Amino acid sequence: MQRRQVLRQAALTTAASLFSVPARAGIADVPLLPDSSLLKSNPEKYWHKLRAEQFYLPDARVFLNNGSLGVAPRPVIKAVTDYLVNGAGLTVPEYEYPRWGYEMMDEHRKVVADFVGCRMEDLAFTHNATEALSTIAAGLDLKQGDEVVMTNLEHASGKAGYALKKARYGVDVREVELPVPPRSREQLVDLMISAIGPRTKVMFFSGIVSPTGLVMPIREICKAAREKGLITVVDGAHVNGQIAVRVDELGCDYFAGSPHKWMFAPPGCGILWGREEMLDRLWPSIVTGGWDDRKKHAARFMFVGTNNRAIFEGMMAGVRFANAIGKERIFERTHSLAKSVRKRALDIGIPLLTPEDERMYGALVTLDLSGLNLDKLMHECTKRKIWVLRGPRLRVSTNIHTRPEDLDLFFDVVKQVRG
């Protein structure tokens, strides 16, 4: 059975298992994926066809800000809409409410755990990486004088949990200044580990650094930190779906992810992972009945009250979508486009803040546009329907819906503004 047939069958099977009657029509049926034979004979035609048929992006829209929020494909939107339609019609059996917040959702967690590479028992669903990171920071037993080491390039949402610890409990925070770009992976490991002091209890850092797209040497840092007795927390908001890793092989104690960035999930999906022996050390922040049932493992962090379960049906559809295309194909395509971004920038003399070493970036490349008129650049981008994240450190995020001509147009605008 071809991947496209598997995708359609999986969607029908999921709908049938969730509802006691045939699903009502929410939105139009999604076209099948392009045949994989086209990918071999004409790769660009395959990816163009996939964008046109599987995404709602207008042909004139250039979307280069996947690092902030990804674009959900048609099957994901359909899964969310159909679940809401069926829920509104109460076409669910009495034991299956159209919500989440009191359920363990083992079957759903198993699907996502297989995708990100971990045991289902160690994975919990949250609304985003920020919520997961806040849960981790708030749940750790830290006291006045204890120290948390992090980098100076952490996202504000990741840093905030420890800033709260500092304000409320007197926990100290030390930031390690990372070179931009760094010379090597070894330099990064040395900088992080040399910052550990006698009061350091936690090392927190991003697996992929948001401002620059730098892929940190996660395993090496976590291994060295654990040998010194530290708890390691990884902000993986940009990791899952952008680079090929297994969460349970990273060596960290806790991990947070945002499937709505690179995993094709709708907004409002997040994941929290903890090593089996570390989950019991984490206090929940939001609780309802069963919060202290350790037999639930990570699932006890999902008992947060009534929520909209439709978004997680969308996340399931996003995982099926990625699996049907093939994760390795996705990684190869998005990284190839990122390499093209690097080359185009260098060809016109634009400095890069993302390292040259291909092991140190995935599908996100950051340009140093501090010498350009940013107001003019954004005006021109808006006029050309180019969506990028504003700033002198301008990130270009590539995904499978990105076309080479999208990059042509963007760099034409950069050259025009530069003069």
Image: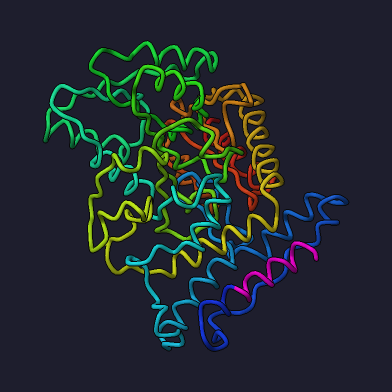
Residue 126 visible in the displayed image: no
Horizontal side of 233 relative to 386 (left or right) equals left
Q: Nearer the viewer, residue 270 or 93?
A: 93
Helix, strand or loop: magenta stretch = helix
Q: Where in the figure is residue 77, as x and y percent of width and height?
A: 53, 69
Q: Quadrant of residue 31?
A: bottom right
Q: Residue at (42%, 31%) from the top-left corner?
A: 392
Q: With respect to residue 202, does 126 lie above or below? A: below
Q: Which quadrant would residue 99 be assigned to in this image?
A: bottom left
The magenta-colored residue range is 1-13
- Can residue 5 be found in the magenta stretch? yes
Viewer-nearest residue: 128 or 115: 115
Please tell me how many numbered marks the rendered image carries.
Answer: 0
List the single residue furthest toward the front: 295
**Residue 84 appearing in the image:** yes
By what rule are the colours in the image chosen? Answer: rainbow
272 sits to left or right of 399: left
Viewer-closest of 403 and 25: 25
Rendered-image quadrant of the N terminus: bottom right
Residue 95 rendering spot, x and y as whole percentages: 40, 80
* Residue shown at the point (61%, 37%) measured from the top left: 411
Q: Is residue 124 magenta?
A: no
Q: Residue at x 59, y 42 (%)?
A: 410
From this view, report whether residue 272 is shown above or below residue 363.
Answer: below
Residue 322 x/y as whole percent: 63, 55
Q: Which residue, as the protein is rendered here, is positioned at the far right?
A: 41
Quadrant for the C terminus in the image: top right
Q: Position of residue 134 (x, y in %)?
A: 28, 44
* Above or below for 171 versus 176: below
Please, is residue 128 above or below residue 25 in the view? Answer: above
